[in-house]
Image (spheres, rainbow, N blue to C red):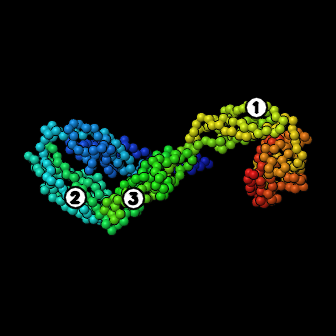
Amino acid sequence: MSTKINVRSPYYLNLTEPLKPQPLFTCEVANIQQLNIDQQGQISVPNLDFGTVLSITSSDADFANDKFPTESSDTSRIVTVRVSIPAGFSNTDDGYLDCSQTVIQPAFVSGTSCSGGSTTSGSIPSQTLDVGGDSETIDLTSYFIAGSDPIAGYKIYNSRKDLISASVSGDNITIASNNIGGSTNLQVSAFDNGSNTCTATQTISITVNAPSVTFDCNDANLTGGSIAQNGTLKKPTSHAQVGQARTISGDTGSNITNYTANNTGSDRSVTLFFDLTVPAGYSNAGNTIECSDTFIQPAGDPEFTCDLANLTGQNISSKGQVDVGTLQLGTIASYSPLSFSEVTTDTARNVTFTITIPSGYSNSGTIDCVKTLTQPAATPTCGSVNYFLSAPKNNLSDFCDSIYSVKKAVVSFATTIRTSLGSSVCSNNAPFDGGNFYYAVYTNSSLSVGKGTGKFDVWQIDSNGIIQDVIEMDCPADGTANFGQL
């Protein structure tokens, strides 16, 4: 797709071609077709619009050797097809998708579902191959007997194409190993061209040996798998059996089936540890080894908290009236209590602010945030410890653009600057109206604060004269502002 935009001078546009969004790969997109079970319980390999069939399994208790037993009546079966997710989809990194379908297995009734046809003769012996292309050719005429019509050919169902390859030429089947060890069952069915005749199926047990190889995590080749935003875990695949998952290496008692939801607001990397049962064919076959795999868990909306709300400027007057102040995010829906009785000494009060949570967060509705405020005495008791304040500043960084004197005389019961949080400040025997501004504070008026003067302390004082915050400031000569709460 290309887009042409005509723009007359002197306007300039800097545009990039939009990216086409990648669709989600689903079972509907894969579109499994012609998934059938014949009267002998053999499953056909289906056709797909997208992806490749990795395996076919069933949770039915009588599913064994990659097939079902024959049934005397039509039987409903749950068949799960594992499909590889091709490139070009948003969930390609998951590796695979399990798609389950209900398939009817027809009854095996001679003369009804089928009749006559080829039959089996004995059993095809188990085969053992070495890794790396070792092969074995079997003459199938010794194991199938033709019915009234000659055998027309053979069909193969190979559920482990990663382990072996198999092909038929005439009456011979050739089985060859790939580059990994393991075991599987290969299904071979003989058919003829007669009308409504039965097929016959033999199962070949195959082991691929790697006797000099100790199976490790490199051989495991963990692929696919994912952790969804809500913590749903899809285990990776391997030609070894993938068992328990844990968050801590070696902690065998911490098996997990889900991870915690990611409400941090950003994607995060998660490493999990999996137990793998070593497949047949390796020197350590049957042992359990631990292998790690790392997933990128996508982010959901973050959780809204009282820290994000950031309530500021709240105070209580000497009459007991609550000033709701402001907040950074959300809306104050209500607060409780609305007021307090007058007190004769400065008193700590807890006020609960109910905040409406804005959109864009994992939680919704309202959240209660409790803030401790100091209610000053109705008849102020101002104390006698002398301090000196600078002119008020809206922001802490405003102290770092110049040098300021500390001349305003006030008194307080606070015995030290740094232990004064919640204390009252008075001027002319009345609460000092600090307006919730910041003030540099010293115990004498001969010093100055600001750019290049070294460290100094700051009080934030509300309109009732209550010290709401105590901060240590440092304004280096380069004009930066460094500060921390005390």
Tell me if label 3 and label 1 are in contact, CB under 8 Å: no
Q: Position of residue 374 (x, y in %)?
A: 78, 40
Mark yes or no: residue 17 visible: no
Q: CA distance from mark 2 to mark 3?
A: 26 Å
Query: Where residue 339 is drawn, which disc sits there?
Result: 1
Furthest residue in direction left, as rendered: 148
Query: Where residue 49 is drawn, which disc sits there?
Result: none
Query: Where residue 288 is drawn, which disc sits there?
Result: 3
What residue did someone put label 2 on?
A: 126
Left/right placement of residue 14 relative to residue 202 reads right
Mark yes or no: residue 359 visible: yes
Nearest to N terminus: mark 2 or mark 3: 2
Marks 3 and 1: which is nearer the front? 3
Q: Which one is in front, 204 or 454? A: 204
Furthest residue in direction front, as rendered: 253
At mark 2, the secondary structure is loop
Q: CA distance from mark 3 to mark 1?
A: 66 Å
Q: Residue at x 85, y 41 (%)?
A: 432
Nearest to N terminus: mark 3 or mark 1: 3
